[in-house]
Amino acid sequence: MPTTAPPDTRQSDLVRAARRESVTRTPVWFMRQAGRSLPEYRAVREGIPMLESCMRPDLVTEITLQPVRRHGVDAAIFFSDIVVPLKAIGVDLDIVPGVGPVVAHPIRTAADLDQLVPLTPEHVPFITEAVGLLVRELGDVPLIGFAGAPFTLASYLVEGGPSKNHEKTKALMHGDPELWDALCARLAQISGEFLRVQAQAGASAVQLFDSWAGALSKADYAARAMPHSSVALAAVADLDVPRIHFGVGTGELLGLMGEAGAEVVGVDYRVSLTDAVDRLGPTYAVQGNLDPALLFAPWDALERRVREIVEEGRHAPGHIFNLGHGVLPTVDPDVLTRVTALVHECSSRP
Ligand code: CP3
């Protein structure tokens, strides 16, 4: 049992920016900041499969802390994966290196839904334990918990693995909308409860990853994905944690992603922060949106782009600096450290 109460992260720049309050400087973190770009990550993961590492609180704690120590970012993102809650309820799946999640028995019929029982905290004691350890280690640095959104999880479950075109997923969505909604309703409970477990254990904010939502038209997103994401986000509405809602290629969906029940909307690099704020209005903070590939550009070009994004963000109701998608494994981690320092320096409020 903890002997001291966890420190208050409510006044951190990350939580304040998410709540559209004033900040001392623009908070910054990077999606996939923990992972293969760091030699210290590759060292501790040596010989340990991805899913096993997600279920060991000692490893989760160490890996989550690594980028905070190294880069001085304003938040830690909990080290786990969107398929961890599915594994925890007994879905037969694995994360294959260089491929991603692969599912042994893809979901195609009503009978296949039996694999998806409701998630309870008893399925994921290792998450509660790891979050508790982390919150004590992190002090006043906030921890961001996360889950996959129903549509993105459904894509892995229906396709059986990663997919470029989501053809089986869309065939099910349109061919059998009732089964689709039944599948996504189960996933919404699982995602929502996974967020709730992390928030109740001490995470200061949560992010719902709907990475593949950009594959949907606005009409299909509104009818068949958004209602389920709303249920997942509503699961933590009564807890004092800002909710970040992220997708890739979702320029057309930004307004709906806010309306689904988020305080912060993630913006990828295809839409400028200025345009995103025009589309979203004053009700939401934004997160983003450096192109991850620009981390490979000469420093002058990268610096110019970082300064532009910080400047655009100053006109947003609230801004959390991030990439438009995850850190690529081949990036030089020193560049991330340098970008973090630059964002802090050029956004510092007198
Ligand atoms: O952001 C972080 O630092 C926190 C950790 C995190 C991971 N996965 C660790 C991970 C988070 C937030 C995720 C979310 C996730 N997982 C998403 C949504 C975000 C996104 O990138 O769009 C998705 C779609 C997945 C599914 C998944 N898991 C993929 C596509 C892969 C990559 C496969 C590969 O090897 O290229 C994984 C595995 C995975 N998840 C790794 C990490 C660090 C790589 C595993 C390794 O190091 O071997």
Image: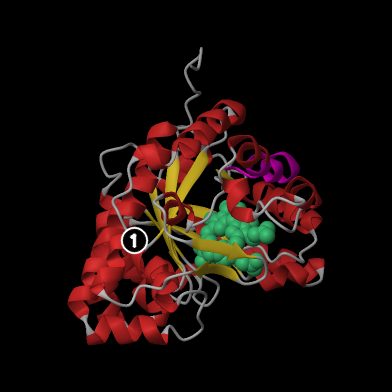
Image coords of residue 103 (percent x, y) = 48, 69
Q: Quadrant of the C terminus?
A: top right
Q: Residue at x 48, y 53 (%)?
A: 84
**Residue 18 located left or right of residue 223:** right
Amino acid type shown at disc 1: Gln
* Residue neighbourhood size for the residue with mark 1, other residues' Cα within 10 Å, grouped as few (<14), some (14–19), many (≥20): some
Q: Residue at x 27, y 47 (%)?
A: 235
Q: Residue at x 43, y 47 (%)?
A: 206
Q: Main secondary structure of the magenta part?
A: helix
Asked if residue 318 shows in the view, the reply is: no
Decide which of 271, 224 is in the foreground and name it.
224
**Residue 262 located left or right of residue 14:** left
Measured along the vertical axis of the image, is residue 46 above or below residue 350?
below
Q: Residue at x 58, y 36 (%)?
A: 57
Image coords of residue 186 (percent x, y) = 27, 59
Image coords of residue 89 (percent x, y) = 39, 51
Decide which of 163, 233 is in the foreground and name it.
163
| Residue picked out by circle 1 | 115
Secondary element type, mark 1: helix
Asked if residue 92 shows in the view, the reply is: yes
Decide which of 23, 30 is in the foreground and name it.
30
Ligand number 1: quarter of image: bottom right
Q: How is the image coloured?
A: secondary structure
Q: Which residues are drawn in magenta?
A: 63-75
Q: How many marks?
A: 1
Decide which of 149, 20 is in the foreground and name it.
149
Label 1 residue near ligand 1, CB within 8 Å = no
Q: Is residue 64 magenta?
A: yes
Measured along the vertical axis of the image, is residue 169 above or below residue 285?
below
